Amino acid sequence: MLISAVPGSGKFPPFHTLVSNMKKYSLLCLLSAGLLASQPALPPAADVEALKSQAVQDLQARYADYRQIALRIWGFAEVGYKETKSSALLQKSLRDNGFSVQAGVADIPTAFVATYGSGKPVIGILAEYDALPGLSQQAGAEKKSVPGLDAGHGCGHNLFGAASVAAGIELQKLIKQGKLKGTIKVYGTPAEEGGSGKVYMVRAGLFRDVDAVVHWHPGNENRAMMNNYLANSSAKFRFHGVASHAAASPERGRSALDGVEALNHMVNMMREHIPQETRIHYVITNGGKAPNVVPDFAEVYYYIRHPNRDNVKEVFARVVKAAEGAALGTGTTMDYEIIGGTHDLLLNETLAMAVQRNLERVGGVAYSPQELDFGKKLQASLGFPAPAVESASTIATFATVDGGGSTDVGDVSYVVPTVGLLAATWIPGTPAHSWQAVACSGQEIGTKGMLVAAKTMALTVIDLLTDPALLAKATTEFKQDVGSYVYKPLLGDRKPALNYRD
């Protein structure tokens, strides 16, 4: 997921005005629909405040435990659908704290759903834990890989999973103590980085009974997530030719690599004639083994992104046609495999405002003098101006922002009201998918931001469990935004691509 974003043009009135208007509108809507009569009485505001204070204190008290979980997963650095140790550690942590855990859901060995409580509301919390290939990095201010390790947590998913589990465990305690009522589900969602793990979980109906979902993501700032993420389809195009000696008998060969290069050339010409918001990326994953052998096999891996899922479908279909033409023109054959496909992210302003309120209550990240010094050294390696290191302690103003990345949370957001936040787990200015992000994710700088996220998610779920008006308004907004659209996964009916990182 790409975290860096540019503020959009959306402007909002002062936050206290938004909150006041939201409450007035919520009450009117509920009275007109007759919903208040069917809901249990709200707990006194003082009780909710006491619950929130307890949650923050308890999470702070167990910080060392959750920090250790995050750092262990950072050390595992397991890529998508191969997160065996990471998933097992999170499952054990939840099981040891009273959750019932269903493992291997949606035909994915490293996916799970952990449940505690009973009855409504049912609130889901998403957890991720996959690393990125080729980003091995030590937790230092210089680029230096970990010997014997290829992957690294350049998107901070080691922190993601640990924070979500921490929030879930704290909520479990409050339910067990009789201070909250409802059901908590922690979803272990593998392979966010290109594997579309959540899509298969949505397709399997695992979110069918859920009233709202809360998630977060590591980043370089603290912000309620009103980010416009892109729909995405990805596929591997495989060309098959005829091997031959490249000098002695080239006329007898048919180069599969020629097919790949012809496809890439046509797609690059296509860029001028597709919607300008479209983003297309590719890497040649197999181009042959030796220059003097005409390669009989070659493969290229493509991503197609756009803010609108229908445009993604149209552009993807054109890329397929180009691949067919490339094979015809080079005397090769071609087949392709859809690897992933994700919807754009459906925002829920009602829930995002609740997150903003709780994030402001929790506050940002305070660095020690040593961490400030480390941050300045790390920023020097970025090669571009960055915000002050101390800005990690601030909370961004509530606003919509335009981002260039994609997330499989988008598919969840089209079947249940969904909200997220960003927490400053990386030194301000640090881009996602960089060695600097890996370095921050493996030390106190990252785990401090992780705790901000855990606290904010726990407080937001407390709101959802104790304020029926908030949940009802979020549901109304969700239904209005979805409209008549019937969810259909972009990756079709394929089985999980468990070997997509091979």
Image (tube, rainbow, N blue to C red):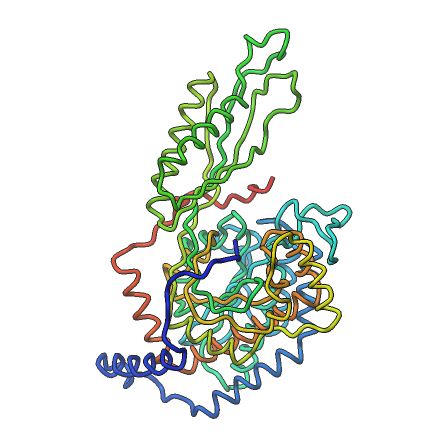
Check the image and report above or below for 350 versus 238. below
The image position of residue 130, as x and y in percent, is 60, 54
Question: In the figure, residue 205 lies in which quadrant?
Answer: bottom left
Question: In the figure, residue 22 lies in which quadrant?
Answer: bottom left
Check the image and report above or below for 481 versus 236. below
Q: Quadrant of the C terminus?
A: top right
Question: Residue furthest toward the left?
Answer: 32
Check the image and report above or below for 268 versus 331. below
Residue, x 38% and y 62% (percent of image)? 9
396 vs 230, nearest the viewer:
396
Residue, x 53% and y 77% (percent of image)? 171
The image position of residue 228, as x and y in percent, is 41, 58
Q: Is residue 171 left or right of residue 227?
A: right
The image position of residue 220, as x and y in percent, is 58, 63
Q: Is residue 406 left or right of residue 82?
A: left
The image position of residue 60, as x and y in percent, is 64, 79
